[in-house]
Image (spheres, grey):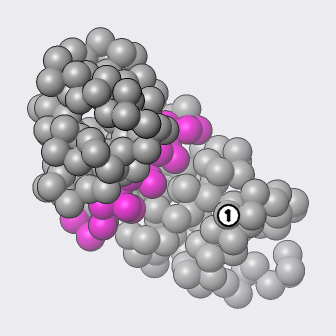
Amino acid sequence: SVAKISECDAQSFSNILWAFATLVVQPGPMIHSISEASLSKLHTFDAQELANTAWSLARLAFPDRPLCDAIAALSMTQLGDFASQNLTNTAWAYATMGFRNKPLMEAISLAAMKYCTQLIPQEVANLAWSVAKISLLDEHFMHAISSTAIAIIGEFITQDLSNTAWACATLEYVNTTLLAAISAQSSQK
């Protein structure tokens, strides 16, 4: 399959990486070929393909810096096209890989604020976790995330509760209403 990588389009690159990442199976030398070949075609990637590629690289523990930097730069020009899941997956991916790309994360935080009332619990928790993982405290963003979390706290699973509490503690962000809601919901689990 390495010989065919040069024939792939954006969706094929993204789908191949996503499949291996979902199965948590290392694609061997193919990942290097995909990384190299996709750089020249990255401008053809849409929002979902960018987000899925970043997510896949993180899940496969393959933090290819040139590709990730290029994905970040292109993502920033397309954030208006990102669905909430694309934003969340991209934030999670960069935080997981340990890339502290402050401009990207600030742009994702700003873009995610327009979705706050539509976010599902895992997205809320993952966004909070992602900004905390790279130590990026944005009071307005955390306030918006906290308000959303409080509104849907009854839908949070234990992992969402713990990720959100961890994010608050890591960022030293104290929202007593959110923390009380996490405490009360944790008691019910």
Taking depth in this image into account, of 109 and 70 the one nearest to the observer is 109
**In the image, is 97 to the left or to the right of 172?**
right
State which quadrant residue 33 falls in. Answer: bottom right
Return the x and y of residue 178 as percentages of the image width and height: 21, 27
Return the x and y of residue 95 as percentages of the image width and height: 49, 37
Q: Look at label 1 and name its amino acid.
A: Thr
Identify the main secondary structure in magenta: helix
Residue at the (58%, 38%) spot, across then down: 97
Return the x and y of residue 60 as percentages of the image width and height: 71, 52
State which quadrant residue 100 falls in. Answer: top left
Q: Would you say residue 136 is visible in this rendering? A: no
Residue at the (45%, 54%) spot, across then down: 89
| Depicted 128 relative to depicted 55: above or below | above
**In the image, is 11 to the left or to the right of 155?**
right
Identity of the residue furthest to the front in this view:
188
| Depicted 87 relative to depicted 128: above or below | below
| Depicted 189 relative to depicted 138: above or below | below
Region rendered in magenta: 80-97
Taking depth in this image into account, of 176 and 99 the one nearest to the observer is 176
| Depicted 176 relative to depicted 80: above or below | above
Residue at the (63%, 82%) spot, across then down: 12
Q: Would you say residue 88 is visible in this rendering? A: yes
Q: Check if residue 81 falls in the magenta segment.
A: yes
Q: Secondary structure at mark 1?
A: helix
Taking depth in this image into account, of 1 and 150 the one nearest to the observer is 150
Return the x and y of residue 4 as percentages of the image width and height: 80, 84
Q: Which residue is mark 1?
A: 22
Residue at the (43%, 44%) spot, across then down: 157
Q: Check if residue 76 falls in the magenta segment.
A: no
**In the image, is 126 to the left or to the right of 115?**
right
